[in-house]
Image: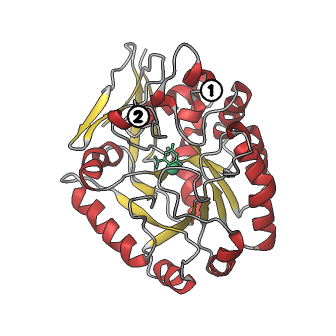
Amino acid sequence: MMQELILRRPDDWHLHLRDGAMLQGVLPETARHFARAIVMPNLVPPVVTAAQAAAYRARILVALPEGAVFEPLMTLYLTEATDPADVAAAHASGLVKAVKLYPAGATTNSHGGVRDIEKIRHVLEKMAEIGLPLCVHGEVTTPEVDIFDREAVFIDTVLDPLRRATPGLRVVMEHITTEEGVAYARAGGPDLGATITTHHLIINRNHILVGGIKPHYYCLPVAKREKHRLALRAAATSGDAAFFLGTDSAPHVDALKEHACGCAGCFTATNTMPLLAHVFEEEGALARLEAFASLNGPAFYRLPVNTAPMRLVKHEMAQTFPDKILTEAGPVTVFDPGFPVHWQVEA
Ligand code: DOR
Ligand code: ZN
């Protein structure tokens, strides 16, 4: 029996596209299915100013395949030297849709991020005034704090004080991975949203570590215990407007993933929508996939929803997806969910 699901074309509210040969190789994977994406600014060097964001946007548009309809939504990388006037102008012109806070040292190319929240207070106040969302990588970097506790500690010691000190600031908790993250986002009211990745709905920490170390399942924030994965599934499939899709699809070439000091990131741009259909069907929530992937994000970002449709079809036969995307920078392994997937995106 063939089953189908029609939804509005989805958007990806957290995506890494990189630059140069990698951008060229991975952009078609996202543009094939997604209408828009919030593009992360952690390039080398990072996208710090409005001028850099405009130049990066132009490079993305040039890299788009012929005929693709895809809109990159640009972000700025917040530093202790960020100029609030530059941020406000970038927002007013429509160029920039969010500013990204990386605690210094928390993840890939975050060393230029923020060490002292006091030093960005004036930028946050300007953002609250103009309604520009702050996307937050929510992990403390304190060496004493266990890596599996870094999100929960961040919420209590950084995020909650920051939000209380800056009324009106609109915040997206990026790629939440814990039941504490779910609970905080759920209770945060209309100025707080949270993205959830595809892979955190599928793997827990056992997938990374049991039976041999699996570098392609290593990402940041690292996947947690099973109870947290279940909390994320409940949140994503609830329809609650606070939760929306941000894949955090983060390509690294295989040589840097399969390495003594492997890079963090799961590459899910290629198969995210079929995987989400599988997950939502398992949860008896197929009817709420559209809210998660296509409606709640635009509502938070105050952007129109997409009108073009996407058609997902469930086949008798398990579907095949490429193992790797071959880019000029090197091969990038596509996230393997570890189970057969019968859903496919079709024209
Ligand atoms: O796994 C991750 N990869 N988490 C991040 O926060 C950054 C990303 C990347 O840029 O590779
Ligand atoms: Zn990310």
Would you place residue 295 above or below residue 78 in this image? above
Q: Position of residue 30 (x, y in %)?
A: 36, 46
Q: Quadrant of residue 289?
A: top right
Q: In the visual, does 46 lie left or right of 133?
A: left
Of 96 and 158, which appears nearest the observer?
158
Which residue of the protein is positioned furthest toward the left in this rendering?
66
* Number of residues whose C-alpha sits closer than 10 Å to that of mark 1, classed few (under 14), some (14–19) or many (20 or more): some
Q: Position of residue 104 (x, y in %)?
A: 59, 59
Q: In the visual, does 229 lie left or right of 248?
A: right
Residue under pointer 1: 205
Quarter of the figure with the N terminus? top left
Residue under pointer 2: 257
Which residue of the protein is positioned furthest toward the bottom in this rendering?
85
Q: Amino acid at mark 2?
A: Lys
Secondary structure of the residue carrying tag 2 is helix
Q: Distance from label 2 to label 1 (Cα)?
A: 17 Å
**Labels 2, 1: front one:** 2
Residue 12 seen anywhere in this rendered image of the structure = no
Of 310 and 244, which appears nearest the observer?
244
Quarter of the figure with the C terminus? top left
Ligand 1 within 8 A of label 1's CB? no
Of 206 and 74, which appears nearest the observer?
206
Residue at 29% from the left image edge and 60% from the top image edge: 60
Q: How is the image coloured?
A: secondary structure
Q: What is the tally of numbered marks visible in this picture?
A: 2
Secondary structure of the residue carrying tag 1 is helix
Residue at 59% from the left image edge and 74% from the top image edge: 80
**Mark found first going from the N terminus, 2 or 1:** 1
